[in-house]
Amino acid sequence: MKENELVLLVGPGTYLVKISDRKLNTEHGSIDLFELEKKKFGDRIKTHTGKEFMIIKPNVIDVLMRKAKRLPQIVTPKDVSMILAYTGISPDSLIVDAGSGSGFLIIFLANYCHEGKIVTYEKRPEFFEVVKKNIELVGLKNVVAKEKDVTKGIDEKNVDLFTLDMEDAEKVIEKVFDVLKPGGWLVVYSPHIGQVINVRKKIEKLNFTQVKTIENIYREWRVGKHTLPEVSGVMHTGWLTFARKVF
Ligand SMILES: C[S@@+](CC[C@H](N)C(=O)[O-])C[C@H]1O[C@@H](n2cnc3c(N)ncnc32)[C@H](O)[C@@H]1O
């Protein structure tokens, strides 16, 4: 392993660290991160108090969730999972997305569609910089980020899946319809119910089928002597509206 490589340390706690001349301080003692240079994935390393950590190669999602910069609103794993499951998208698909935000949704999708291509549009330069950095950080090569207002035109054609997570999404749905292949999916993520209503009105005017809006309610459970649902956590993220182009 070499300097600056990202490594996941899993033991009493999980840490994503960069190999460097720094020390990692945990509540179970410290680890000299330079020592990792002499190790390989699958080896173990001990803190100065003797606690063991396993050295693991981080995957795209480890890096995304632990190191990527997050702008206020991202699409979370629970909602991404619904997109993959309901659209039945395959790993070689062409996916187009707007707006990129911090790129969480497209990175999840690109990690799954590793033989395909994902194109994302972002109109704000400061967010475009963030999404570019996040794509580089996770190391995916099948994502193209474009600094462009998607309402001004879409360059791609024969799209398998078009995801929209932006204000006024309804304004671009007609253009999206035109570039979807027959049988291709539109999925709109809307944090507010007023947005869902506007999107549904637009979808009804076009030749879409299998239209539905869902909310995925997710609750973790605390398992122990007294097992019970967590009383706080992510209570609301957004609604997902699905629609499939007929012809
Ligand atoms: C909530 S964020 C998207 C978050 C993203 N899905 C994620 O998971 O990280 C919405 C983004 O849409 C962008 N946006 C809004 N209207 C747009 C448009 N017409 N064209 C391109 N991007 C747009 C905004 O600048 C913002 O960055």
Image (cartoon, rainbow, N blue to C red):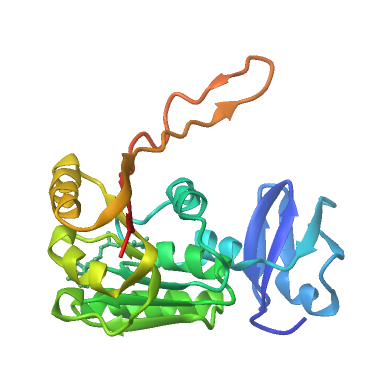
Identify the residue at image location x=36%, y=81%. 145
Viewer-closest of 160 and 121: 160
Query: In the picture shown, does residue 152 fall above or below 78?
Result: below
Viewer-closest of 9 and 68: 68
Q: Residue furthest front?
A: 247
Question: Residue 225's spot in the image, x, y percent?
Answer: 69, 16
Determine whether, in the image, residue 59 is placed left or right of residue 144.
right
Question: Residue 63's spot in the image, x, y percent?
Answer: 57, 66
Identify the residue at image location x=32%, y=60%. 246
Question: Residue 86's spot in the image, x, y percent?
Answer: 47, 49
Identify the residue at image location x=15%, y=58%. 170
Determine whether, in the image, residue 148 is placed left or right of residue 63.
left
Quadrant placement of the N terminus: bottom right
Report which quarter residue 193 is drawn in: top left
* Residue 198 appears anywhere in the view: yes
Question: Residue 115's spot in the image, x, y percent?
Answer: 59, 77
Quadrant placement of the C terminus: bottom left
Query: In the picture shown, does residue 79 fall above or below 103?
Result: above
Q: Residue furthest top?
A: 226
Identify the residue at image location x=69%, y=63%. 8
Report which quarter residue 53 is drawn in: bottom right
Determine whether, in the image, residue 114 is placed left or right of residue 215.
right
Viewer-closest of 134 and 192: 192
* Residue 241 appears anywhere in the view: no
Viewer-closest of 200 and 76: 200
Ligand 1 quadrant in view: bottom left
